[in-house]
Image: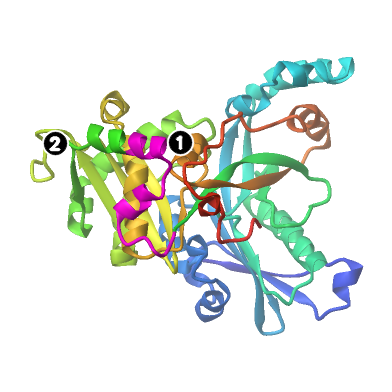
Amino acid sequence: MRAICFPALCSKAAQRELPLNFNLYSSPSALPAAQWDALVPEQRPFMERTYLDLLDASCPGDMRYLTVFRENQLVGALVFQRVQLQGRHLLPYAALEKQEAGQLSKLAHTLRCVAVPYLSRKRWTLLHSGSPLTAEEPGYLFSPELQPSERQDILLQALELTGRDFGNISGFLTGNGGFELPGFLRLPAEPEMLMSLDLGWKGFDDYLNALQSRYRVRARKVLSASASLHKVELDGQAIRQQESKLLALYQQVADRADFNMATLGEGYFSGMKDRYGSDFRLMAWYGPGQSAENEADVPLGFQSGIYRGAELHSHFIGLNYDRAQDFRLYHAMLYEYISWAIERSSRNLRLGRTAPEIKSSVGAVPIQKSYQYRHRNAVMRAILGPALRLAHIPAWIPRHPFRLSNHNEPHVSKD
């Protein structure tokens, strides 16, 4: 729960303003509650102290929290997590198409052929802004009064200060906050899939009627395939009783992820229900002949989500892959999220960064994202450069399911 205070070392442009002071915390319970809550907007749920308390319990010892004050005003709030990155997780992003390989110079191709196999065997301890468990959250926000140069300076200093506090950090990975960090490589990130809902939709049938005929037929086939399953929305007591089963299903999904730097801990889902009440929903899906009342029955899958303001954030899911595909369960879960959003008149449904093509097929559109990365060692930066500069997201085909094209326009900025 300790806090460490640091004076800021800003650029010349920033130094013309009043000085900034940094405070580093190892627990969210030590944060200045009223000021943090006033700075964090409702549409940033994964920066709320309510959520940070739970995340801290799920990742003990790996979280840090930093505040930046100008005089007595909080002007910056930042969250960091220490994570483990295995080089093999980068391989899907390093594969080149034939035409891309043909465009490389002989030297670049040779360097890349040497670098990629070497990097695939490496493992790094990184400082990640925000948490990879909430990939759409960059992990920092600032007062509107700060200039871009001040925001850049603050993030750079916060990374260095927090990295020194942990003591074993080999590199930094941060979301792109609309500004370039000097000395950092820009890396592509999977797009965030966002669906905007027509506020005239009063039920799921209104959504279906907005689809083109072939997508409506596809939706009905998915709903038919999953019709024999039993959906049960779990309350807090039921979540606690089923928690080990839920975590096992979640782990199946986490284990299949191409890029996974952190996993959930025991008590996460019951903690979410305790903290957010009706704003957090968890639906368990049981196979034919199964029920939530029979303690021996294990769900085929579950989905969770959190309402904040006018948005529904899809959250973690779990799947029994051996059986879920028979019922097209993942696709059915996406339609269930849409139903949840319509029920609460949500303006936007945030579907996260995985499986962009299938999410596109139900009406989500990609919001392009990127990371910035810097290794602390100059030699490693030279080795990483040829491989990481060519990193790209695996290709996928965007779908356009709505009859009217403006249904696909998101209602938020792309920052």
Q: Which colour scheme is used?
A: rainbow
Tell me the crowding category of disc 1: few under 14, some 14 to 19, or many 20 or more residues within 10 angstroms, Cα based.
some
Q: Residue 221 or 87: which is nearer the viewer? A: 221
Instruction: Tell me the amino acid under the disc marked 1.
Output: Ile
Q: Which mark is residue 161?
A: none
Res 50 quadrant in image: bottom left
Estimate the x, y position of residue 389 in percent, counting from the top left: 77, 33
Q: Residue 43: give x, y in percent of width and height.
A: 51, 66
* Residue hosting label 1: 358
Reply yes or no: does residue 209 show up in magenta. Answer: yes
**Residue at the image point whose x is 52% and y is 30% from the top:** 258
Q: What stretch is highlighted in magenta?
A: 198-219
Residue 284, compared with residue 47, is above or below; it is above
Residue 375 in sight from this viewpoint: no
Q: Can residue 321 be seen in this view?
A: yes
According to the picture, the residue beneath numbered tag 2 turns out to be: 297
CB within 8 Å, label 2 to label 1: no
Secondary structure beneath dot 2 equals loop
Local crowd at mark 2 within 10 Å, few (<14), some, or many (≥20)? some
Q: Position of residue 56 (x, y in %)?
A: 46, 57
